[in-house]
Image (tube, rainbow, N blue to C red):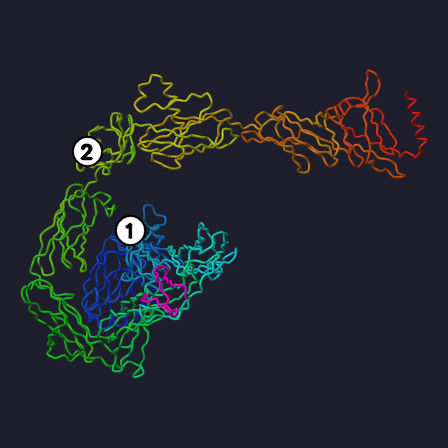
């Protein structure tokens, strides 16, 4: 069974009861439950350690807790298969598991912990110092949730060149619903950020600290961080790792997607088609970048003698492409320029080849290149380019767009460009050579582009393990140093070959097999998956083109080695120059053929010389042997003596371990007390358990590791042990009453030597707390300024003395006032020089401690000014929004606020009375009004330049005030409280919509009047509507039946609103007026008139039995003269209504003023007819219909006779 499977099955089983058992291990916790009282004891009994992840042959083990305190327990020999461990831990300690760890000689180098209870993730049980009568927390106790971390950037495919944007968030479920944070939750700065190039695939487990490099720590729970990239290797793949650790040590972790570093600038291969332009037209320019671009490249062309012209580009699926229109009059070589940004943000402008084309000239043919061939790989770093060209040319060679070479032709038209040194770092060693032929007038041929690569093999140097190493355990690290001059990413594969002599399966036909691949150079392997024996180890690196194999190393895999246990534990400490080291040697318990111990040696010179030891019984011939080695050390013997011990079993397998002897005859240094600090105050905020009386705190410090520290306070002594790794010690202390105390600490080392004492003086008292209310830090004062502050003592002590002073930077404080007994006073600053370098200070004492609070302030008696002020509009309807903006300036403190007040027109405006002036005024009514005015000022918004010399501001005020004229006053206030002079603007609120007066109609210039309350208009007639509206109307229209509307325009001469209307259809329609005033008030739609649309008058004639429209006709009007009682012709052309309008379909339109009329109608070949007299009481349209007859044809003479008859009858 693998260790992972053991962990899972154990966790599932352990959740059910405090007694746990499997096939070979038993674990009992004496105090059951999820909340237990300290101290408590656990019991472990085991048949064998070999099945529980222990390295075979371990000779020691210890039992401990997975918690915040990790109390040390004594180690037990692995032969002791049953052990009891007792723990006394602080109240409230959340225990996430009980572990057993096996090791050989040193606890630090032991196996991974095996959990007897819990899993190290959530709280298994909580320790309490109270009696067992306290209630037990149900459902498994208080869970210490692991923080949850999410990395949101980098995500996806990312390339970076100078900085990596890191974005993350973290949370802890313990913090949900708490105020001030849960004791198991997150602190204010719990986050650390790392990077790693060792993690290709993440299995969502906490990453080993050895595999991640710190970037920054103490970040807030959520946020972002821009990491300025240092010396990361381009081409390697990296991940960002974000850890959040909560207050009980739980770690949450998330990992970003892979990203890589790209520091190379993009380069370009350009090609123009056609490359020679013989007539005006278009040139297609392709741009092939060396790497993918973030955005389209910028492309431009400069013709000889012309200006640079930008050319838009687009992606055609293979390359970027632009179309250039050739300009006339600029023949010669046109130069192409390109600029582009790659995915990492690097901008490149280098054109490797094809940076020009020719217009109106014939270039020479391109040269012929004999060697090297395109896309070839060079054998050395220096090459020659050979070829031939036309006799009137010279050769120009450009390397990678920057370096240039030239060559002349020989008698045979051949050329050689010699000693071209290839660049092995650019573009992974690929060099681009552009070769052109240039004629005598400077015209260049099309380039011949050669891609020549200089590839270097990667270098692979095997680092770990060392030769002849014995590999064992589940996490053995293999590492190699890999480099590639081409900066190619190198894939490293570790391989092993079983040696025939070792007896490993495979025999003479054994082959190299792979242990795994990595790009980081490091690989962790599980040697338990390999058979014990001897192997060759090598590393094989490939850059995709070439492969390099490291030298091989002989290694052994042995997961069942002998073990050595020393009676003194990790080291032997003696107070003299010699020591006797005792212990036992054990052979591994291999079923069926357990070996025996054949020898034990020790070395005082790190393995150069070994001295054999005799077994205690005289002979090494059993599975277990005792030994006792007496070793004398040369003077000076003081100090630690590193001793190597080597045991060998009957198979020839050896184990080497270290067990030092420390000769310590010198008294140790006194321990360091880190907390509390000498002269410090301990307050109730320091109290670790506010539920108890007095003050509970933990003293801590550093001392010699494994020494016993004695701490004394108020006549009581306590002992604690300094940790074996870094010497950290802690001791819980308590104080019952406030006052001054001395804490002393001394230690006794492992050899019994005692140190001197370290003393720290402390005071249990909370000093007074001082808070400035006005001014604030960085604020300003002016004139007679009201200083306000708050002094309180958390302990409730009486403030015995306080004083306020001021000063300038670097100067001594100047006393202002003391023992005031109040929390405010007026400070006259008018005589102080203006400046921003003042400080204001308050000192307060409770008789035990004195507190000081100092803030930096400005003294500024200058008044800010309003530089600009405008309102967006000055007329508003109901519920309008007043908007104003402007700018202001202040020479010292800077503009802090903009304020505004709204007064009715005619309402008195009063400036505020300054502090200290109220009592001097005798006009109490004026004072009251000024106070009311001060309360009416409201804050606007500073748009830009807050607290700076120049600022812009804006005001937005929803209007909820009565109709009428109003004034808007605006002023600005600087950071010192100085108020500018107010400026004002006027505006009007009008919530009443415009009122309607009357409606009249006119035809041409004459009015049309209604009859019986409605107008009558013939279809097709165009009439004008004249409407009278209230004077503030700004917009009006008429709405007619059928969704028709007529816009009205105001006639400035008459003040009436006018619009033309035509009614195409017969019927009745209502006229509705809609009007809006300057304030935006819209009147309700109001029906103001009814119009009856009738057919116009029509003239017809008879044709047989049919009536046909008279297309050509004359409609005359005779008007009655009452004085003469006769009719005369109506002069329509000179009237307001004009002549009759003749319509083609026999209809006519005619309007007449009040009077009596007859119509006389005639037409060609038609009889003349007249109507009966009719009277119009008001000006009206006339819509009379008449039917005429056709005139019979007469002879010429009858017509002449009729004319003469008519003529003479008239005379």
- Residue bearing mark 1: 218
As drawn, the residue found furthest toward the front would be: 411
Rendered image: mark on residue 680? none
Determine whether, in the image, residue 333 is placed left or right of residue 576.
Answer: right
Give the mark toward the camera: 2 or 1. 2
Q: Quadrant of the N terminus?
A: bottom left
Q: Nearer the viewer, residue 639 or 821?
A: 639
| Residue 202 seen in the current view | no
Rendered image: mark on residue 811? 2
Q: Residue at x 18, y 68 (%)?
A: 105
Q: Residue at x 26, y 31 (%)?
A: 835
Q: Which residues are magenta?
A: 391-420
Determine whether, in the image, residue 1052 is placed left or right of residue 171.
Answer: right
Position above or below: 398 against 1160: below
| Residue 568 seen in the current view | yes
Indicate the position of residue 882 as horizontal and vertical percent values: 47, 31
Q: CA distance from mark 2 to mark 1?
A: 37 Å
Q: Nearer the viewer, residue 1202 or 896?
A: 1202
Determine whether, in the image, residue 358 is placed left or right of residue 846.
Answer: right
Q: Quadrant of the C terminus?
A: top right
Q: Nearer the viewer, residue 551 or 219?
A: 551
């Amino acid at each position: 069974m693998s260790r992972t499977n053991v962990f899972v099955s154990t966790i599932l089983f352990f959740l059910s009861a405090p007694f746990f058992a499997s096939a070979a291990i038993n674990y009992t916790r004496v105090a059951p439950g999820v909340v237990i009282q300290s101290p408590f004891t656990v019991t472990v009994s085991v048949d064998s350690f070999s099945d529980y992840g222990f390295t075979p042959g371990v000779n020691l083990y210890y039992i401990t807790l997975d918690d915040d305190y990790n109390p040390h327990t004594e180690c037990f020999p692995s032969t002791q298969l049953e052990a009891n461990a007792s723990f006394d831990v602080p109240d409230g300690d959340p225990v996430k598991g009980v572990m057993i760890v096996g090791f050989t000689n040193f606890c630090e180098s032991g196996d991974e912990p095996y959990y007897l209870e819990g899993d190290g993730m959530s709280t298994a049980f909580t320790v309490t110092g109270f009696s067992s009568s306290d209630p037990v927390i149900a459902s498994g106790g208080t869970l210490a949730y692991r923080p949850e971390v999410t990395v949101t950037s980098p995500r996806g495919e990312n390339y970076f060149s100078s900085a990596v944007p890191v974005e993350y968030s973290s949370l802890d479920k313990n913090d949900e619903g708490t105020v001030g944070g849960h004791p198991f939750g997150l602190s204010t700065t719990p986050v650390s950020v790392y990077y790693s190039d060792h993690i290709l695939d993440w299995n969502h487990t906490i990453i080993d600290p050895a595999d991640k490099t710190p970037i920054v720590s103490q970040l807030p729970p959520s946020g972002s961080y821009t990491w300025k990239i240092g010396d990361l290797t381009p081409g390697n793949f990296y991940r960002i790792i974000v850890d959040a650790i909560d207050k009980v040590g739980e770690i949450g972790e998330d990992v970003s997607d892979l990203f890589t570093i790209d520091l190379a600038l993009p380069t370009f291969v350009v090609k123009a088609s056609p490359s020679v332009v013989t007539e005006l037209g278009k040139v297609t320019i392709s741009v092939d970048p060396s790497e993918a671009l973030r955005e389209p490249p910028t492309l431009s062309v400069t013709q000889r003698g012309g200006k640079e012209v930008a050319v838009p580009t687009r992606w055609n699926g293979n390359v970027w492409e632009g179309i250039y229109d050739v300009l006339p009059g600029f023949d010669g070589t046109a130069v192409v320029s390109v600029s582009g940004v790659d995915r990492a943000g690097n901008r490149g402008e280098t054109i490797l080849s094809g940076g020009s084309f020719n217009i109106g000239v014939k270039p020479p043919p391109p040269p012929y290149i004999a060697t090297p061939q395109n896309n070839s790989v060079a054998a050395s770093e220096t090459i020659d380019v050979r070829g031939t060209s036309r006799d009137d040319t010279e050769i120009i060679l450009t390397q990678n767009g920057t370096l240039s070479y030239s060559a002349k032709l020989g008698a045979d038209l051949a050329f050689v460009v010699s000693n071209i040194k290839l660049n092995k770092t650019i573009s992974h060693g690929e060099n681009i050579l552009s070769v052109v032929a240039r004629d005598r007038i400077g015209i260049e041929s099309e380039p011949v582009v050669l891609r020549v690569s200089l590839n270097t093999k990667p270098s692979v140097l095997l680092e770990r393990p060392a030769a002849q190493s014995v590999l064992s355990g589940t996490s053995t690290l293999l590492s190699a140093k890999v480099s590639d001059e081409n900066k190619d990413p190198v894939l490293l594969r570790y391989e092993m070959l079983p040696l025939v002599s070792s007896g490993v399966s495979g025999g003479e036909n054994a082959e190299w097999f792979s242990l795994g691949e990595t790009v980081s150079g490091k690989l962790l392997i599980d040697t338990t998956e390999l058979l014990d024996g001897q192997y060759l180890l090598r590393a094989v690196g490939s850059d995709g083109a070439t492969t390099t194999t490291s030298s091989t190393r002989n290694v052994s895999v042995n997961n069942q080695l002998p073990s050595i246990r020393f009676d003194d534990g990790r080291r032997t400490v003696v107070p003299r120059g010699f020591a006797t080291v005792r212990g036992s040697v054990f052979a591994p318990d291999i079923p069926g053929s357990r070996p025996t111990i054949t020898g034990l040696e020790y070395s005082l010179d790190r393995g150069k010389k070994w001295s054999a030891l005799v077994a205690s019984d005289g002979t090494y011939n059993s599975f277990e042997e005792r030994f006792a080695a007496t070793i004398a050390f040369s003077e000076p013997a003081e100090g630690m003596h590193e001793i190597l011990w080597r045991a060998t079993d009957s198979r020839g397998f050896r184990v080497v371990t270290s067990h030092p002897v420390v000769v310590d005859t010198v008294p140790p240094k006194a321990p360091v007390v880190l907390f509390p600090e000498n002269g410090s105050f301990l307050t109730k905020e320091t109290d670790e358990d506010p539920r108890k009386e007095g003050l509970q705190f933990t003293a801590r410090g550093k001392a010699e590791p494994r020494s016993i520290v004695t701490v004394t306070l108020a006549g009581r002594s306590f002992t604690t042990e300094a940790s074996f790794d870094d010497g950290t010690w802690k001791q819980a202390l308590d104080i019952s009453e406030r006052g001054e105390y001395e804490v002393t600490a001394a230690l006794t080392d492992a050899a019994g030597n005692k140190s001197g004492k370290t003393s720290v003086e402390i005071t249990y008292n909370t000093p007074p707390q001082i808070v400035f209310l006005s001014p604030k830090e960085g604020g300003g004062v002016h004139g007679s300024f009201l200083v306000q502050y708050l002094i309180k003592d958390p302990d409730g002590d009486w403030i015995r003395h306080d004083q306020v002073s001021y000063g300038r930077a670097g100067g001594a404080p100047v006393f202002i006032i003391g023992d005031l007994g109040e929390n405010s006073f007026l400070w006259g600053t008018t005589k102080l020089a203006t400046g921003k370098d003042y400080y204001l200070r308050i000192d307060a004492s409770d008789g035990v401690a004195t507190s000081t609070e100092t803030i930096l302030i400005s003294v500024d008696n200058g008044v800010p000014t309003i530089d600009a002020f405008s309102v967006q509009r000055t007329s508003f309807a109901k519920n309008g929004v007043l908007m104003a903006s402007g700018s202001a300036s202040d020479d010292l403190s800077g503009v802090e606020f903009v304020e505004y007040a709204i007064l009715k027109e005619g309402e008195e405006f009063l400036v505020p009375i300054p502090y200290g002036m109220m009592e001097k005024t005798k006009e109490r009514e004026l004072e009251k009004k000024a106070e009311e005015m001060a309360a009416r000022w409201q804050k606007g918004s500073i748009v830009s330049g807050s607290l700076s010399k120049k600022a812009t501001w804006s005001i937005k005020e929803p209007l909820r005030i009565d109709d009428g004229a109003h004034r808007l006053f605006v002023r600005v206030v600087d950071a010192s409280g100085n108020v500018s002079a107010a400026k004002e603007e006027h505006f009007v609120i009008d919530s009443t919509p415009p009122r309607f007066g009357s409606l009249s109609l006119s035809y041409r210039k004459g009015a049309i009047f209604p009859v019986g309350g409605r107008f009558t208009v013939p279809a097709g007639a165009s009439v004008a509507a004249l409407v009278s509206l209230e004077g503030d109307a700004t917009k009006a229209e008429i709405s007619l039946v059928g969704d028709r509307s007529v816009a009205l325009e105001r006639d400035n001469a008459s003040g009436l609103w006018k619009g033309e209307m035509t009614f195409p259809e017969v019927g009745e329609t209502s006229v509705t007026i809609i009007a809006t005033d300057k304030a935006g008030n819209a009147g309700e739609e109001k029906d103001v008139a009814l119009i009856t649309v009738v057919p116009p008058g029509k003239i017809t004639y008879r044709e047989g039995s049919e009536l046909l429209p008279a297309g050509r006709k004359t409609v005359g009007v005779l008007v009655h003269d009452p004085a003469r009682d006769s009719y005369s012709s109506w002069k329509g052309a000179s009237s307001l209504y004009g002549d009759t309008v003749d319509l083609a379909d026999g209809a006519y339109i005619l309007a007449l003023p009040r009077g009596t009329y007859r119509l006389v109608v005639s037409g060609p070949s038609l009889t003349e007819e007249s109507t009966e007299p009719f009277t119009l009481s008001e000006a009206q349209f006339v819509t009379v219909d008449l039917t005429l007859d056709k005139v019979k044809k007469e002879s010429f003479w009858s017509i002449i006779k009729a004319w003469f008859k008519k003529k003479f009858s008239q005379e």
